[in-house]
Structure formats: C-alpha cells, structure tokens
Image (tube, rainbow, N blue to C red):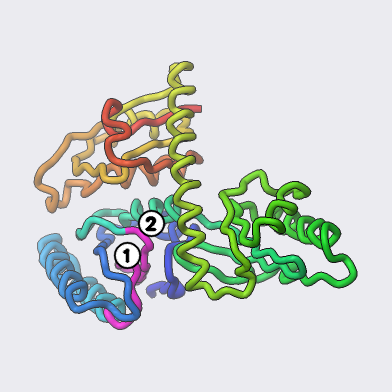
Amino acid sequence: MTATLPRATGPTPEQVVLLQSLRDDLCVSLLASTTPAPRMADADARTLQRLAADARVRLARDGAPPELADALEALVAEARTGPTGAAVALFVNRALRQVVRLPVRVADRVVVDPTFATRDLVRALHRIPRHLVLLLSEREARLLEGGAGTLRPPARSPFPLTADDDAGDAFLRRVDRALGTFLRLHPAPLVLVGGHRVVGRFRRLSHNTGRLAGTVPGNLTTAPATVLVPRVRAVLDGYLLSRQDEALAHLDHRRSRNAVVEGIDAAWLAARRERPEMLAVEEGFTLAARLSPDGDFLVPAEDVEHPDVVDDVVDELVETVLLRGGWVAFVEDGTLAGAGRVALTLR
C-alpha cells in the first residue's frame, strides 16, 4: 500500500520528517526548477519528462520493477496540471508517492538512493521559515501564519481582534496578550504590519517581540495575500541574512573552544560519532561518494549513477545532523571556502 501526503504549496516540517524517515532499496527523487505560474510551462514539463526518462533508465539498470517508473510518470503528469513555484520535487518508492512544490530554485537532477533527497526541502524551510504576521491598525488586529509563499489565518488563535471600549494602548495591550498566548504554543519569527504610529506604540509596550524579524509599513490590515507576501518576504530575506551572520559568529565562538570540525570528511565522521550541534553548509555544495564498509569514511566518485554511489553525501549529512538533534544553517556559496564549504559545531 502506498501513502499519499496532502497537496501543499511548499514543504512543511512534517513532510520533511516523514520523507527522511523512509528507507528503501530504491527511493527516487526528481527535482527541477520551474517558472512560477498557475500551470506548469511547456519548457518545464519537457524538463520533467527528460528527468523521468533518465530515472526510468537508471531504475531498469538497477532491476527495479517497472511499476516504480510508471508511478513516477504518473507524478509527472500530476505536477504538469498544477501550479508551479520556483521548483518542484517528486518522490517515489514502494511506500510513497509525493509532489512538493518549492519556493527556492534547485539543481535539476534525479537521485536514486536508499533515502530520499530532502536537502532542498530543508533549505526551503530555512530560506522561508514558518513565521507569523501581525497586521495592526488602531481598531483591528489580524494574525496570519506564513511559510513557503503562503499566508493564512492559523487554525486556532484568538484573532482577529477589534477594539470595543479599549481603543488606544488598552487595545494594543489586549492584542499583545493574545499574541503572547499564541507564541507560547507556536513560537516563530514575527513580522509587524501597520502604520508607523501604531506599530511604534505596539513595539514600546509589547512583551512578545523578542523574535521580531522586521516591520512592513502601511495600513494593510485587509490587504490580500498577493500584496502582503512579497513585502513580508523582503523583510524575511533581511532577517535570514542576519541569521547567516549569527551562524558564522557561532562558528567563530565554537572555534575558540576547539569544538568545530571542517570539511566534508571530518564533518561526516563527527556527525556520526560525536554530538552534532550546528551544521553550516554552502547552499551549492554537493558531492557524490562511496561509503567505506563501516559507513564512516567517504571516497569521492565520478560515476554518480552507479548503484554503490551516494548521489549527494551532503544531503545525507544534513539528514544525519537533524536526526541526531542538531540544526542546519545554509550559507551563501563562498562563505565557507576556507573551511572546505562545510563546518560542524559539536556540543
């Protein structure tokens, strides 16, 4: 029996955890960049078809049952009929069929390994983390939950709120109490949207802006998502750059305590044998390799399609760190050039 996850506009943490938990002899991951549109462009559809044809050849060479390649073709057909974001990912094995639309571009590729290639999904969660948007005016407050290019009201929250006899600061304090209640159960970075005056007053009296990502000026309480999403995304981009700086500062701090290993070989071994804390890795860094019999050492490989070769050990390293309780910081290419493009801090 196969499992089908709900259609989504982008990856969720639950999807990533499920995909990372599945192991099989043949897990097929097909990833391709696309042009955002209500329906997939013809050029993108041709790219998917080409990648699916490559996958069919690899599966046949690996002795896979033809039903697996047929299932991938069916997912390609499904993806072609729906809307597209910056990329699309298709996942197939004997237990699962899944299409995930991504808000970040990817390298077009097919991966056939014992695990799914989820690195780009993790990167998407990092690039557009779950966040909250509080829209404020003098007499109204709305709360939206965002992630992967969407904004929608949370399933359960005290919002929206309107001023009754408590206009002014009394209303804003009531909003802050409701926000605090929600954040205690659902912590996330916060974006404030509203006029300069009301946002300034709220920030002065609020006790819940410790993870404030930034503000969007303007009376946009009733604005549609198509207006809000790009403005909020611009704020988050700046916030994520600050997170990259924090990750690099954390690396320097850990180096002073001799608690950093650098380079893919050392990071791979330490992630398995030590207690990983934070993995910093350049977004564009990939490496195909064979594993030693005990799995602790890597041998770079050029014959990527050989069954014994792991298509991208960086993807496997990301999964290992996450599964062992660490966290991942993707940084811009070139940032870790002196560290072999990857560095791991240890607890």
Q: Are marks 1 and 2 in contact (CB under 8 Å)?
A: no
Residue 209 image point, x, y percent: 68, 48
User: For the point 34% across and 80% down, which residue is it?
Assistant: 38
What distance separates the C-alpha of mark 1 from that of mark 2? 12 Å
Q: Is residue 230 above or below residue 320?
A: below
Residue ID for mark 2: 121
- Of circles 1 and 2, which is in front? 1
Residue located 28% across and 60% down the image = 27
Label 1 sits on a secondary structure element that is loop
Side of 147 where 343 appears, left or right: left
Q: Residue at x 27, y 70 (%)?
A: 35
- Label 1: how many residues lie within 10 Å, few (<14), some (14-19) or many (20+)? some
Choose between 271 and 127: the one closer to the eye.
127
Q: Nearer the viewer, residue 41 or 309?
A: 41
**Residue 284 in which image quadrant:** top left
Residue 139: quadrant of the picture: bottom right
Residue 331, compared with residue 304, is above or below; it is: above
Displayed quadrant of residue 321? top left
89 falls in the magenta region: yes
State the image coordinates of residue 309 (x, y, percent, origin top left): 18, 46
Q: Residue at x 21, y 42 (%)?
A: 287
Percent from the top left, x then y, of residue 29? 27, 61
What mark, if any, has residue 86 been given in the picture?
1
Decide if residue 220 is in sight here: yes
Q: Which residues are magenta?
A: 80-104
Q: Is residue 265 visible?
A: no
The kind of residue tagged 1 is: Ala
Q: What's the residue type where badge 2 is placed? A: Leu
How many numbered marks appear? 2
Q: Position of residue 8 (x, y in %)?
A: 44, 71
